[in-house]
Amino acid sequence: MTDRELLDELQYVLIEPPDQGDTWPSLIWTRDEVLEAVNGAIRTLYRHVHLYVGGVHLPVAAGATAVPLPERWLATVLVVWRDLSTTPPTRTPLGPVDSFEGDLAAPGWEVTPGLPLGYADLDTEQRTLRLVPTPAADGLAELLYVLVPPAVTGALPATDLPVAEEFIDGVKYATLGWLLRKVGRLVDPERAAYCERRAQLTETAAAILLGGWS
């Protein structure tokens, strides 16, 4: 399905004159709001089920307090620390932690370097990764991460949505759930909740298809 075909379907459901998303005469939503909802729905699906995953080795110097993440980073899947001070280099799987957990597990971790045991994603102006504790030796952060999907613009010519056909219903219903919760003349929490449940069903199905039964 293309982006403009999806926008057409959204217009039918929301009782807007279908023109592939170019205009929204009711003025309840703007075109930008609808596109924001579509892109948000796609990013959420990517993030929750790890739809498309990339890998990279990030060099980290001893004492580094911030490691820049890849430009297309959306969410971290797995981090392994490779300590280059040992022969052969040792590899340590790292778990996600926050500052509070770091303080409990390794008091003084910010100023006392050691072997990294965890990582924290820091969503600042520049996306960065913080190792906990600060590494005492040079190493590599082996990172698996969810890639940011291509943005849906609805422009001509139409382009295919960056999700498989099996998951498009989830994007559609997640978008509708967001739009129907907007405060206005057509705010409809009951229909929005139904749409959100349908989107969750797609996420569950996607997780099973990608990861298998367990």
Image (spheres, rainbow, N blue to C red):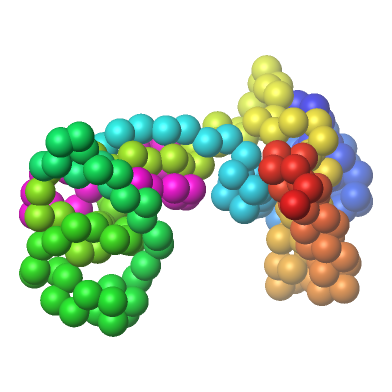
Q: Nearer the viewer, residue 205 or 175?
A: 205
Is the residue 1 above or below the residue 28 in the image? Answer: above
Residue 60 located left or right of residue 185: left
Image quarter for residue 132?
bottom left
Asked if residue 57 lies in the magenta stretch, the reply is no
Question: What residue occupies the far front of the structure in this picture?
Answer: 87
Residue 71 located left or right of residue 8: left
Residue 155: x and y, percent?
64, 27
Residue 47: x and y, percent?
57, 49
Residue 116: x and y, percent?
23, 58
Q: Is residue 94 visible?
A: yes
Is the residue 102 above or below the residue 211 in the image? Answer: below
Magenta stretch, residue numbers: 59-80
Q: Nearer the viewer, residue 20 or 44?
A: 44
Is the residue 97 above or below the residue 208 in the image? Answer: below
Image quarter for residue 58?
top left
